[in-house]
Image: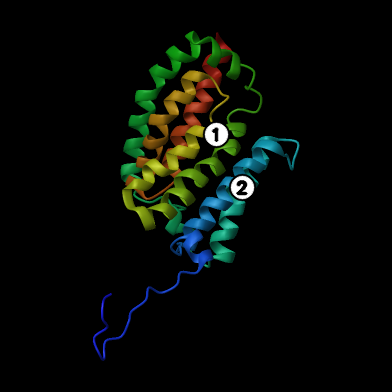
Amino acid sequence: MQRQIPGERRTSKPRTDPVNWLLGESLSFDWNIVAISVVSVSLLVFDRYYSMTPYKYWDRVILYLFVPLFVIIIICREHPRIYGFTVGDWKAGIVLTLLGIGVMTPLLYVFGRHDPALNAYYRGLTTGLPWTTLLDLIGWEFLFRGWILFGYARRFGPEALWLQSVPFVLVHIGKPELETFFTIIGGFGFGWLAWRTKSFVWPFLVHWFVATFLILVAASR
């Protein structure tokens, strides 16, 4: 039997609260990231299952442009410019936008005419062009290349380019296969253009051209 040395105190392990043991270490969140993540995903889900107006493009202006701006300005008390709501570096924006359109045009023409899935999906959407695609995409681009991208960038830096592209790709599931695969690269490319120019405007202009031109090519077949 081990003898206790006089004056020596026995030490016992502190008891662990079963609840704390089960839950593990406490978590600390950046609530700006939480708000952007929860609200943006909720908007995407709402858009998928519900309609507020007779036209989806008006729904998307409300959901993806007005709601994020409301959260930024009214709730977070921040300037939208922080999230790319500005023309940014317009000189670089003009050059890169024209280059992007120049690269995309022949690809869109070839695939729009010769891919049956793309052709079938887009050829019936000519009514209201180019205003329907403008309304459909301006909020869409602000959500991904504005609010999500620049909001995440404040915490994660350039990794936000990949983070914003993940939901962008996922919401394309159900569209033509070729387009969905392309968004893996396209989502990053649009994000980089916004990152470079500090503005969502320039990827919006490229995306607006891509959608409008693809519809026209599909309809002309």
Q: Quick one: quadrant of the C terminus?
A: top right
Residues marked 1 and 2 touching at CB (< 8 Å): no
Q: Which mark is residue 42?
A: 2
Q: Position of residue 219 (x, y in %)?
A: 58, 14
Image quarter of residue 101: top left
Q: As drawn, is 2 to the left or to the right of 109?
A: left
- Badge 1 marks a residue whose secondary structure is loop
Q: Between 120 and 129, which is closer to the camera in this rendering?
A: 120
Lower position in the chain sequence, tag 1 or tag 2: 2
Q: Quick one: quadrant of the N terminus?
A: bottom left
Q: Which mark is residue 29?
A: none
Q: Position of residue 111 (x, y in %)?
A: 45, 14
Query: Going 32% across and 37% down the picture, which residue do you hit?
Result: 95
Query: Going 48% across and 44% down the picture, which residue do you hit?
Result: 144
Q: Residue furthest left?
A: 5
Number of numbered callouts drawn: 2
Q: As drawn, is 155 to the left or to the right of 132?
A: left
Above or below residue 71? Residue 87 is above
Q: Position of residue 125 (x, y in %)?
A: 63, 22
Residue beneath disc 1 = 171
Above or below residue 161? Residue 187 is above
Q: Between 204 and 10, which is closer to the camera in this rendering?
A: 10
Q: Amino acid at mark 1?
A: Val
Q: Between 108 and 7, which is closer to the camera in this rendering?
A: 7
Q: Position of residue 87 (x, y in %)?
A: 42, 50
Q: Amino acid at mark 2?
A: Ser
- Badge 2 marks a residue whose secondary structure is helix
Above or below residue 174? Residue 171 is below
